[in-house]
Amino acid sequence: MERIYNFSAGPAVLPREVLEQARDELVDWHGCGMSVMEMSHRGKEYMGIQAEAESDLRELMGIPSNYKVLFLQGGASSQFAMVPMNLFRGKTSADYLNTGVWSKKAIKEAKKYGAVNVVASSEDRDYTYAPTQESWRLDSDAAYVHFTPNETIGGVEIFWTPETGDVPLVADMSSTILSRPMDVSKYGLIYAGAQKNIGPAGLTLVIVRDDLIGQTVPGTPTMFDYQIHGDNDSMYNTPPTYGIYMAGLVFKLLKARGGLSAMHRQNLAKANLLYDTMDASDFYHTPVARENRSLMNVPFTLKDAALDEDFLKGAKARGLMQLKGHRSVGGMRASIYNAMPVEGVQALVDYMLEFELARG
Ligand SMILES: *Cc1c(COP(=O)(O)O)cnc(C)c1O
């Protein structure tokens, strides 16, 4: 059976090689007579799988040794609460940048634990850009500074690392992690749901500097305490074992493909195919400011929204799926994560040109 090109924002496309390897190992992993899904998380085989996934991720991202890598559950949405619960550390307020839907959700949740100072917002222009650092009003007494380097719905990405002095920088990297190299040492904490650029849904990754943990707000549930998970190598309770195994296969593949610099080059090439097509056309339009055009999520509109349905129908007929924009934005959105092959983006561009010629 031929695979479609899946432009879904998440859960998203996974590398074919990884799916095929998982299939080959599904029933009998490496001759041990059982599936990874059936293994005790405290057994030698599974512990090896998880340790290897962690060390491959550390190598890929260059994670310093004073950072914990935690394999959790609950999605990035749980981190909206876990971050303030763990990082307020006796302070009374935290700084947040507001660049769209996901920032707003993080802000709303943090307000349950203390004051939130919104350092800057792009709401004035419908979240189509990211405020530059000069306009941020940082509070030097803030517990941490939180931002969303890639707003998955708006398609707004920040390609620079904010300077926050001694105040820890926290990033929701759900839809940008592993897409390009990042200097982990500039961050206090990075978190990401796996279902965009890492692996299947159900796994949530947290990378946290170890001096920031262990001072939770009173009443924090045990399962929401980073220190508990860190002290137990993410095995305080049963971790999402199969998701971690799949993520580990993805990490190995990215290493074999040349690591994050190589991914960055490919992602730039893929995104430019789409943005160049739009720039050369007055039929397609992307609302996002040029310097914030996401490499991972590309929203765009057609000149006449009445053509949207026909566009999607024609796309589907060519195996180009999940291009409908988020219900809050409308139009189209092509998510082109690491696992989207360049051929998929080329097929989309070819279709866009054909559709414009016929209907524009
Ligand atoms: C998808 C996404 C989330 C929500 O992730 P869940 O795992 O569904 O909780 C949060 N932030 C960003 C930037 C996302 O892309």
Image: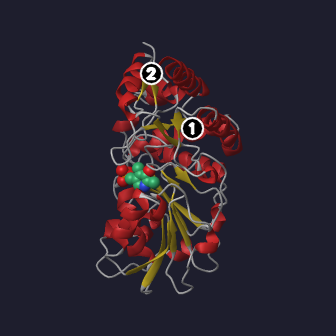
Q: Which residue is mark 2?
A: 4
Would residue 330 be found to the left or right of residue 60 on screen? Answer: left
> Whole-percent x and y of residue 157?
56, 53
Picture residue at 62% right of the left edge, 80% below the top: 166
Picture residue at 49% right of the left edge, 47% below the top: 50
Secondary-structure class at tag 1: loop
Q: Quadrant of the N terminus?
A: top left
The answer to whether 17 is drawn above or below residue 78 in the figure is: above
* Residues at discs 1 and 2 in contact (Cβ within 8 Å): no
Color encoding of the figure: secondary structure
Q: How many marks?
A: 2
Disc 1 residue type? Asn
Closer to the chain start, of discs 1 and 2, is 2
* Residue 72 seen from this side: no
Q: Quadrant of residue 26?
A: top left
* Marks 1 and 2, how far apart at CA: 16 Å
Picture residue at 60% right of the left edge, 35% below the top: 253
Q: Quadrant of residue 357?
A: top right
Disc 2 residue type? Ile
The answer to whether 217 is drawn above or below residue 344 in the figure is: below
Q: Residues within 10 Å of mark 2 (few under 14, many from 20)?
A: few
* Residue 315 seen from this side: yes
Question: Residue at the top extreme?
Answer: 1
Q: Residues within 10 Å of mark 1 (few under 14, many from 20)?
A: many
> Whole-percent x and y of residue 164?
62, 75
Would residue 200 be found to the left or right of residue 119 on screen? Answer: left
Q: Which mark is residue 196?
A: none
Picture residue at 49% right of the left edge, 63% below the top: 122
Secondary-structure class at tag 2: loop
Q: Which residue is mark 1?
A: 338
Disc 2 residue: CB within 8 Å of ligand 1: no
